[in-house]
Image: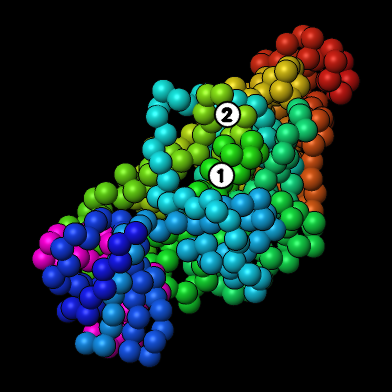
Amino acid sequence: MSIKEYRTTVEARGGLLVVKQTPGVAFGDRVRIEDHAGKIRNGQVIRASDDEVLILVFEGTDDLDLESTWVRFLDEPVEIALSPELLGREFNGLGEPRDGRPPVLSGLHRPVGGAAINPAARTYPREFIQTGISTIDGLNSLVRGQKLPIFSGSGLPHNRLAAQIVRQAKLVDESSSFSVVFAAMGVSYADAKFFRDEFANSGVLRNVVMFINLADDPPVERLTLPRTALTAAEYLAYDLDRHVLVVITDMTNYAEALREVATAKGDVPARKGYPGYLYSDLAEIYERCGRIHERHGSITMMPVVSMPSDDITHPIPDLTGYITEGQIVLSRELHNQGIYPPVFISPSLSRLMKDGIGKDDTREDHPRVAAQLYALYARAQETRNLASIIGADELSERDRRYLHFADDFDRHFVGQGEAEDRSIEATLNLAWELMSSFPREALTRMKETDLAKYYQGSD
């Protein structure tokens, strides 16, 4: 490793540092900056030439005296130490401990940028992951290797939902090792404490790796945090043969940090000021999950995306939807009615659900139950709209049955307690209980064998 040290810093703007006369410095090199007070900051080269380099400073450039600043180029990428001791620990976006315990000591270090996965080496995501949440397990099932984002809004309980998924997620068909990598960006101190306490009190902390960036931490650190978390996930999945669930909250804070740095760099802005490479940058993160041929482990991802002004067409959720395989959409209307989790099933979707459910994975009636529930709820939503125009008293007996079903569905199937961990069996039985309020002939998507075995209504 050759170390180059300079004191030729000429400009600091935002989280960026410009250093002149630095030949031989490569893009992606790790940088150590020492200010006039002897404080050490970390950085990475994001633009390089023989005349000038641009450095992304993770701790920010506040209070830097440029003439007294030493910049050391370490001729190595930003790396993280990897070991089974990661489990049960909490780190910042650079992989440095936040829990007051010593750093992880290991001879194995890997760049946080990761290595591109050969598409030909990928294998199709399959097998069901149980989250214990009926609207996900029953209607938008998560499978191993899938990317399934949660689209939320300001003030909606996406943090509570993310914590519940971390606590409850499990495999149902084998005793494989299962771990969770939890990454939070731009969260408040209260939210960070909530996550720590939830995982510790539920006893899952020993199987969780946490990466936390607080709201008052440097925003540019958020650009590294998901990559650091995914490097840890890749180690657990492909080196230790674990099935890993990666929960990231909130990708909107990541995109805001990216826009801030892009503006400081002078990049040409695109939609709503975000850089034109936002799509490829998000894809670089999301596509690191999946399954690989001849590897037992897998990486499944559930990123949280808070939609500014509840706008699902905003660039961040819009581009996320192109890259990922579905979405879980939270509803402000259901939240205002006191329903938790407020999952709105109409726009929610899991494109890979069909490959993880059925006879060999969950239960033989699961695909048809999901299709029937969606059909009944869609008709019930039409009836609700009609009732808002002509009044519920003017509805026919059949329409009133649909209206009653919609209310029961929202209260009992969508709504469940934060500590309520429903098995897939319990979810499907609850679905049959709700569907059995209709006569057999109304359940057109079910087989006769399903009706004979599970129908609970009177013939």
Counting from the top left corner in percent of width and height, residue 353 is at 59, 27
Q: Amino acid at mark 2?
A: Arg
Residue 151, placed above or below residue 447: below
Tell me the quarter of the picture where residue 337 sits: bottom right
Q: Is residue 379 visible?
A: no
Q: Which residue is mark 1?
A: 235
Is the residue under label 2 in contact with that under label 1 (CB below 8 Å)? no
At horizontal 40% and vertical 41% (from top left) the residue drawn is: 115
The number of callouts visible is 2
Secondary structure of the residue carrying numbered label 2:
loop
**In this picture, residue 324 sits left or right of residue 203:** left
Which range of residues does the magenta coloring cover?
Answer: 45-66
Graded by Cα atoms within 10 Å as few (under 14), some (14 to 19) or many (20 or more), the crowding at tag 2 reads some
Tell which of 144 and 276 is nearer to you: 144
Q: Considering only order in the chain, which callout, 2 or 1, is on the residue closer to the N terminus? A: 1
Q: Amino acid at mark 1?
A: Tyr
Counting from the top left corner in percent of width and height, residue 216 is at 48, 77
Q: Which residue is mark 2?
A: 295
Q: Most extreme residue toward the left, as rendered?
A: 51
At horizontal 47% and vertical 63% (from top left) the residue drawn is: 94
